[in-house]
Amino acid sequence: MWTSVMVVRNESDARRARELVARLGEARSAKDVAQLRAQSLLLEAYEKQKWPARAVSVPDIIRYAMEQHGLSPADMAPILGTRSRVTEVLKGQRRLTVEMIRRLHDRLGLPADLLIEAEPVAA
C-alpha cells in the first residue's frame, strides 16, 4: 500500500501536517490510518528536534511545588530543616537527605523518585 506524507522541515510544514493529522483523526480505511501514523511520526520527530526535552532539576521541582502550594522559602524550613538549608537546596548547593525527601513526599505529594539525584560520577 502506498500513501503520501509531508516532510516537516519548518513551522509552516508542521502547521499543515497538524491539519492533516486532525483531518485523518477519525480515519477508518487502512490507507488513511497508515497515512495518519506516518505523518504523526514525522511531525513528532520535527517537534522533538525543535523543542528537545530537558531534564528538570530537583530545585526546579521543589520551586514548582512551592508555587503550586503557595509556599515561600520560609514556609519550607519545617520541611527542609532551616531557612539557610532551604536556600542551599533551592540554589542546588545541597543535596536532599532521605528525611527531606520523605517530608517533601508526605507534605507536598512529590514523588520520591523525582527527588533522588544520581551520584556524581567520580573523575
Image: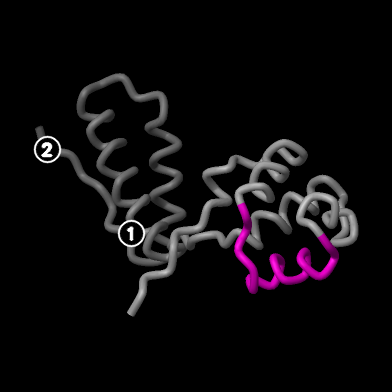
> Does 121 sit left or right of 64 as displayed?
left
Q: Tell me the amino acid under the disc marked 2.
A: Trp
Q: Return the x and y of residue 78 as percentages of the image width and height.
A: 85, 51
> Does 71 sit left or right of 87 as displayed?
right
Residues 23 and 63: in front is 63
Q: Tell me the amino acid under the disc marked 1.
A: Val
Q: In the displayed orientation, state which residue is furthest to the top.
A: 28
**Which residue has dot 1 on it?**
8
Q: Secondary structure at mark 2?
A: loop
Q: Which quadrant does the C terminus fall into?
A: bottom left
Tell me if label 1 and label 2 are in contact, CB under 8 Å.
Answer: no
> Does 117 sit left or right of 20 as displayed?
right
Q: Return the x and y of residue 113 as percentages of the image width and height.
A: 52, 44
The stretch of residues the image draws in magenta is 82-97
Relative vertical location of residue 79 with respect to residue 31 in this rendering, above or below: below
The question of residue 84 being in magenta is answered with: yes
Q: Return the x and y of residue 12 as percentages of the image width and height.
A: 44, 62
Residues 41 and 113: in front is 113
Q: In the displayed orientation, state which residue is furthest to the bottom.
A: 123
Q: Return the x and y of residue 49 as percentages of the image width and height.
A: 37, 64
Q: In the displayed orientation, state which residue is furthest to the left.
A: 1
Which dot, 1 or 2, sits closer to the camera?
1
